[in-house]
Amino acid sequence: MGMVGMAGNKNRRASFRIYDEVSLFYNKIDEELATEPTSEFDNTFNNPALTSGTERTSARLLSNLQKRLPGFRAQDTEHATLNVNISASGIAFTSEDALQEGDFLLIKILLLSSMAVIMAYCKVIYCKNSNPYENQYPYLVGAQFINMQDADRELLTTYVDKKRLQQNWVRGLMLVAAVSAILVPDVVFGSLFEVLHFLLEHLLELCHLAFEFVESALDHLIEHLFHTDLQQTQAIVFYILFSVALYVIYAIGKRLPSFYKRCKNSLISYVLRKKSSLLYYWHEQSMTNKIKLALIGVAVISGYILFGM
């Protein structure tokens, strides 16, 4: 058994945090249970008919066993997803319950991208209102890992480091693209326009060829089945294609509002999440680091104005 203690670290950003999709269960427990051996994790979650040796744990935990969190459907684990902010020292997630600061939780996390299961005892650090688009799960809970098996802690640390490396590559490419767009915007946007024009031109040509192929196939099929002349065949094919086009437009139009709403809510949630993350990061910095960040920002903007424009 290993202990994960971050209480002495004022800046909780010391552990790198990532946003990820997981399946998550938690049980609210008494404080003294948070120091019990972590070997009882599997019994608590996976064996409702616990033996007499674990009756003490069973009596306190089974009333809330496998409490469902946002996105999890007990009968449909294929789509059991929940966006969380997780690090080797803690986790933040949305919840339908208003937990209290200082509550202790037994938590089970399934990392969907690797299908690895991690279990730990946690202490609730904060519980506040979530963003306005989380109507079903209105609370945002932040919890600190206080007791975790060594194997699970190593697995989580490795997983977070791997995700961090992937994110660094993506952010590096985005930074290169942004710097290139700032320094040589004419070259970047000119090349981008040429690539888009090339793709659009060939896509339209491919669609035209596909349409011609379908039309020709229908012409031969109608003429062979009904022995029609050229004018009759063209008229029948026209009405068939026109009906198919109307159906496609209707199907797209029917799904477009819900798709737009999902995209809008997802974008707003992402912006709010990033805004909260940046504000938290800024709040946790010392005055010296805040001054450094401000000076770097002023220097970058001034350099661009003086030399880049």
Image (cartoon, rainbow, N blue to C red):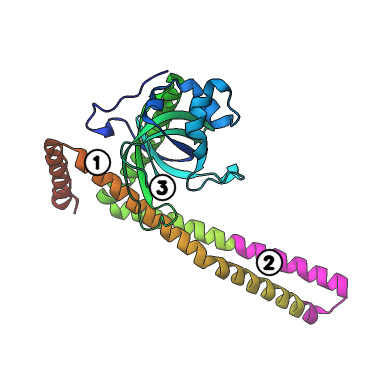
Q: Crowding at label 3, few (<14), some or many (≥20) Cα neighbours within 10 Å?
A: few
x, y percent for residue 48: 59, 32
Residue 290 placement: quadrant: top left
Count of labels shown? 3
Above/below status of 222 relative to 124: below
Q: What residue type is labelled 1?
A: Tyr
Magenta residues, dominant SS class: helix
Q: Which of marks 2 and 3 is in front?
A: 3
In space, the residues marked 1 and 2 are separated at their CA atoms by: 57 Å
Residue 180 or residue 110, whichever sits in front: 110
Amino acid at dot 2: Glu
Name the N-terminal-most of marks 3 and 1: 3
In the displayed structure, would residue 286 be above or below residue 227?
A: above
- Kindly tell me whether residue 167 is visible in this rendering: yes
Residue at image x 52%, y 61%?
A: 201
Up the image or down, 28 lies above or below 308; here it is above
Q: Which of marks 1 and 2 is nearer the N terminus?
A: 2
Which stretch is magenta?
206-233
Q: Quadrant of the C terminus?
A: bottom left
Residue at horizontal 87 percent and vertical 75 percent from the top:
226
Residue marked by disc 2: 212
Residue 97: which disc? 3
Which of pointers 2 and 3 lies earlier in the amino acid sequence?
3
Q: What element carries label 1?
A: helix
Residue 37 x/y as whole percent: 44, 20
Which residue is identified by label 1? 281
CA distance for labels 2 and 3: 58 Å
Q: Look at discs 1 and 2 and give the one toward the viewer.
A: 1
Left or right of 123 in this view: 201 = right
